[in-house]
Structure formats: C-alpha cells, structure tokens
Amino acid sequence: MSRTRAVLPFRWPHPPLGVVLVEPEIPPNTGNIARLCAATQTPLHLIEPFGFTLGDRAVRRAGLDYWDKVPLHIHPHWSHFLETIKPQRFFLFSTFATRSLYEQTFAPGDYLVFGKETKGLPEPLLAEWPDRVLGIPMQPDSVRSLNLSTSVGVALYEALRQVNT
C-alpha cells in the first residue's frame, strides 16, 4: 500500500522566521536542526567556530538528504551576523532566562538564537540584550537543560503557531 504525506493547512510567515546557532558543538544536533529548518523553510544561520565540520558524517546523517533544502548561512562571528543580516528583532534562548517564550509575541522575520550545547550563549551577549532573553519552562529541580535540537523545535513551532493565527 502506497501512502502519501498529507499537506496540512498552514500560513507560513513572510518574511520567514530564522534560527541562529552560535558555535554549535554536537554534529547530530545541528543535523537535526537543519532537517527542521528544511521542513519549515526556515533560514538556518550558523555562527563559527563549530565543534565539527559541515562535512562531518554525523551532521550529514542527522540532516539526511535534506541539506539542499536548508536555507543555510554561515557567519564567522556574531557581529558578522548582525552586520550582514541586520535583524530587526531577535530573541536569545537561555536556561537562565527569567521570562518564558510563552510570554513573547513573535512576528514574521524574528530570529531565534541558541548557544552551544555545553555553555549556552555567552554571558556578554545575554547581558547586552536582557529584554530579549527567553527560556523554555521546565519543572524546578528536574534537568539542567533540554537538548539543543529539542529546544529549537519547541521555540520554532511556538513562534510559527503564533504567526499562523
């Protein structure tokens, strides 16, 4: 029996949202996030240095054969991202946030920024834009953090849900 994937009704944002990974370290996380970005046609911005090469087998395997569908942008550092993209709005995700992503109203063109798996975003970056720092709610005394690709999925789909209404 042959099955066809359903196309669910959805109003994709224009301009699209963007996902930014600052110095990602773990290849499968970046590959999974790339696949998520391919599925939603969300531009993926990677800020160097990486803890791997994009040709790494684990990155490629996690992203499957979807890499050609990912709107991918590589930046040598954070300031290059700011200078070349000139984002009007961006939000920084941190386990140290005092404000939940569910308190934020997202809009088309917003960028969702995530840090490296072991340390998160650099403290100076969080301190520079404290009003843009958001977190994903977790039970107190449960875990230190969520997996990076899980966090991106939660945040991206919440932002997409909001802009679809």
Image (spheres, rainbow, N blue to C red):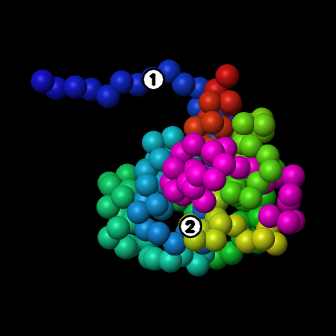
Q: In terms of depth relative to the viewer, which is nearer, 15 or 28?
A: 28
Residue 6 percent across, percent down from the top left: 36, 24
SS type, badge 1: loop
- Residue located 27% across and 26% down the image: 4
Q: In terms of depth relative to the viewer, which is nearer, 116 or 63?
A: 116
Q: Which residue is mark 1?
A: 8
SS type, badge 2: loop
Q: In terms of depth relative to the viewer, which is nearer, 90 or 140?
A: 140
Residue 22 percent across, percent down from the top left: 63, 67
Quarter of the figure that contains the C terminus: top right
Residue 162 part of the magenta-drawn span: no
Query: In the drawing, what numbered circle is on residue 39?
Result: none
Q: Give the vertical position of 65 relative to 56 (above or below).
A: above
- Residue located 38% across and 56% down the image: 63
Q: Nearer the viewer, mark 2 or mark 1?
A: 2
Quarter of the figure that contains the N terminus: top left
The amino acid on which the numbered mark 1 sits, given as a three-letter code, is: Leu
The amino acid on which the numbered mark 2 sits, given as a three-letter code, is: Glu
Q: Give the vertical position of 6 relative to 133 (above or below).
A: above
- Residue located 78% across and 39% down the image: 104
Extreme-front residue of the structure? 141
Query: In the drawing, what numbered circle is on residue 117?
Result: 2
Which comes sooner in the sequence, label 2 or label 1? 1
Label 1: how many Cα within 10 Å (few below 14, some 14–19, many 20+): few
Q: What range is drawn magenta here?
A: 126-154
Q: Give the vertical position of 122 relative to 12 (above or below).
A: below
Label 2: how many Cα within 10 Å (few below 14, some 14–19, many 20+): some
- Residue located 78% across and 58% down the image: 86
